[in-house]
Amino acid sequence: MSTRQFGAKISRNIDPELLRGEGKFTDDIPLPGALHAAFVRSPFARARIEAIDTSDALACPGVVAVYTCDNIEHLDRELPLLIPHPSMNNARTQRPLAREDVYYVGQPVAMVVAVNRYVAEDAALLVDVDYDALDVELDMEKAILDDAPLVHPSHPNNIAADFTQVSGNPDTAIAAAEHVTKLRVQVDRSTAAPMECRTVAAWFDHVSSELTVWDGTQAPIGVRGGLASLFDLDEDKVRVIAPHVGGGFGQKVMFPYADEILVPYAAINLGKPIKYIEDRRENFIGSNQERTQIHTIELYATKSGEVLALSDDFLHDTGAFIPYGIAVAQVASTSIAGPYRIPNIRVRFRAVYTPTVPVTPYRGCGRPQACFAIERAMDQLADELGIDRFEIRRRNLIRDDEFPYARDGLLFADGLQVKHDSGQYLRALEMAREAIGWDDFPAKQAEARAEGRYLGLGLAFYVEGTGLGPYEGGHIKIHPITGKVYVNTGLAGQGQGHETSFAQIVADQLGVNVSDVIFREGDTGAYDWGVATFASRAAVVSGNAIYKAAKVVRQQLVEAAANMLEAPTDEIELTDGYASVKGTNRKIAYSTIATATNPLRYAFNEAAQIATQFAPASKHDGPPLAEGQHPGLEATDYFSPSCATWAYGVHAAIVEIDPVTCRVVFHKYVCIHDCGNMINPTIVEGQVMGGLAQGIGGALFEHIEFDDDGNLTNANFVDFLIPYATEIPDIEIQHLETPSPLNPLGVKGVGEAGCIAVGATVASGLADAVSHVSGSKFHYTPVTPDMILEALPQGTAQ
Ligand code: MCN
């Protein structure tokens, strides 16, 4: 195995197990004697709770306990604000179980624990809650008016945060501008819709006082820390395992949802294992969502299309609580200038409380909205100035020699200045232009129009600050018996292929096959330093931590082998699990080196016998460890990024409107993207494709619909449409690899990239398709067939 593994297209090693149905998800964990939990949830978007009567539920055979705010002791409190920010005044977070008031349909009010889920669900229906319904306003633009009903009386005009950032000197630039383009765009609410809904199971061992929790979370270490502090346990007494997780997409990163603390609480309280598996309806009404933003964006430009200043003022729907602070809105506000060198920016947002399920990051986290705003604005500017859409972008893109390009005054969600670290933006645009066939398109469009067809070309450029800190760690150990390499991190994957891509990094450093690297994540019992999987950060932060640890183990291998083979270190080669002396047949297996470097050897295998020749053991044990020496081949290291690294890409699509159904048909979809050096292009493409499919969902189908009373009216997959394979076109992906200068591997993240530009691309294509007959600009997503019908001349659609 002399070929380099980093950068190789290798199939994901976890897939066969998952495809055969052999994955182990929380619900597959055998917990003999487990009780099951079900929740009573608010049917009102806003109401006072006059009384809760649990007596009928408690009398139900098989019911073991019913919890309300009155019998959960110290847990009856507002949960912590996860990301504080000075722009928020008295940020409101949720109580595990409602007390006195409910703030959204789906809010947990009581938890029933019973011998099985059927009994628990039936008994939950018997909990009698007396509500006094209050007025609600779900429309953000009305919710900020003086007479609007308040979600929290503590917050006038429903404003949770009001924050402005300024870069450069917008006022001067605005005064100098020759042209201004202004538009209002809206992206509406969606949800992550993971295949597996959220899950949690817990067991407390009263003898050892150890709490074990299986949680389909993106952040087991965070959950562990939270539970330890809530239950006043040493962290070492709490083990959180994220087994296989059927997709997270951001929805499973937030801690704590009510169930995540109440299920462990009941397990401690009742002395029995407890399980809660959220059902699909609960996932729709009770698990966090994202996306609604309304932007009013203005571009101030010269007549030749050079953008001098950008002003954006947007409303961000934060739902009824704001546990994540302003993170989503801040990411949107700092991505608003996209890839353009706009020196003067003023961006303000107001986060608005609405009586709906809370808003936390969902794949893309504010970037799809920002991309939609700036890219629709760029198209409009191009139209108004009579410049073609590729050209207007070309004139404004950050040029290669301008990197690193800092936006003074704009702080990203990590609190650090926005700085685009590297890229080839002009080249990416040119590649997209060629791949989509921009030069030939006008003729094709003219031909289509002559036949009465609506054919359009859309494009959008996106940027994504990835790889947020603060840090991750990696632990590597070569096993003395088998020579296999074990790698542990504090991450938890939900389908990102970490098992393969991180094995590739290690395989290269240590000279082993990827199949000999065993990667483990999602278990605080195995490794418990780190943060979580979110913000497209694993490749950057964990990848580099693992790389650093692997380099240390490599050095250990080389030194030990040099000693055992009596050769200088620079003569040692590492390949295929053996250390050898260059140009000779003298070689030694890693298992032997690992065994020999451990003074205490009770192994009975061949490696141990051979190892004895090199370092003969005394009767029971080997030579003492020298000062500073440690046994075996093992290292832990950490990586802490200095700031976000910026990935980017361009999408271009040729779309046609089916005049009968107003369906959007994709003729071609091209995605040029750059996530720095790719560890595994197969995984990168899978991530881009998955994100893109989610983006198409958001652009055309997926839409959380509330009625005027705040009821979610499409809480199922019949009415909430996610795209199937039949709706996803063939995607032509082309890679650019501009290394990030900010980390040793030169990588940038890719997990969210695919979804960011899709809405803007589709809208751009649709507006182009109808531009000869309609002024429709498609400034709203999802674009529904109704909207398309409205854009067509009357009577066109059949
Ligand atoms: N990768 C690579 N080369 C790079 C960058 C990344 O080969 N230059 C590989 C990584 O090694 C990893 C994968 O691509 O195997 C994604 O890496 P990264 O971009 O670091 O993203 P994370 O692993 O941190 O995953 C989080 C990201 C986010 S924020 C969401 S949301 C999302 C996503 O990943 N949710 C997902 N992708 C998902 N994919 C699946 N199947 N399920 C989800 O819930």
Image (spheres, helix red, strand yellow):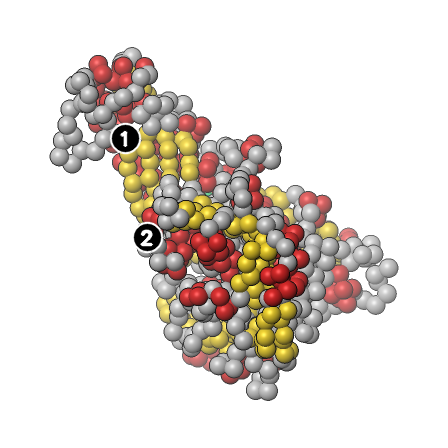
The residue located at (14%, 27%) in the rendering is 624
Give the number of the disc on residue 689.
none
Disc 1 on helix, strand or loop? Answer: strand
Figure check: 14 above or below 646: above
CB at mark 1 closer than 8 A to ligand 1?
Answer: no
Label 1 Cα neighbours within 10 Å, binned few <14 / some 14-19 / many ≥20: many
Residue 10 visible to an observer of this rendering: yes
Type of amino acid at the residue the image marks with label 1: Leu
The residue located at (39%, 58%) in the rendering is 231
Give the label, 1 or 2, closer to the camera.
2
Residue 385 visible to an observer of this rendering: no
Is residue 731 rendered to the left or right of residue 719? left
Location of the C terminus (image quadrant): bottom right
Location of the N terminus (image quadrant): top left
Figure check: 289 above or below 246: below
The residue located at (16%, 18%) in the rendering is 618
The residue located at (77%, 67%) in the rendering is 790
Is residue 641 rendered to the left or right of residue 454? left
For mark 2, what is the residue? 234
Compare marks 1 and 2 and give the one earlier in the sequence.
Answer: 2
CB at mark 2 closer than 8 A to ligand 1?
Answer: no
Is residue 229 rendered to the left or right of residue 797? left
Q: Nearer the viewer, residue 211 or 243?
A: 211
Residue 154 spot, x, y in % from top left: 48, 81
Residue 13 spot, x, y in % from top left: 51, 33
For mark 1, what is the residue? 633
Q: Nearer the viewer, residue 62 or 713?
A: 62
Disc 2 on helix, strand or loop? Answer: loop
**Gap in Å between the C-alphas at discs 1 and 2?**
30 Å
Label 2 Cα neighbours within 10 Å, binned few <14 / some 14-19 / many ≥20: some
Residue 628 spot, x, y in % from top left: 16, 36
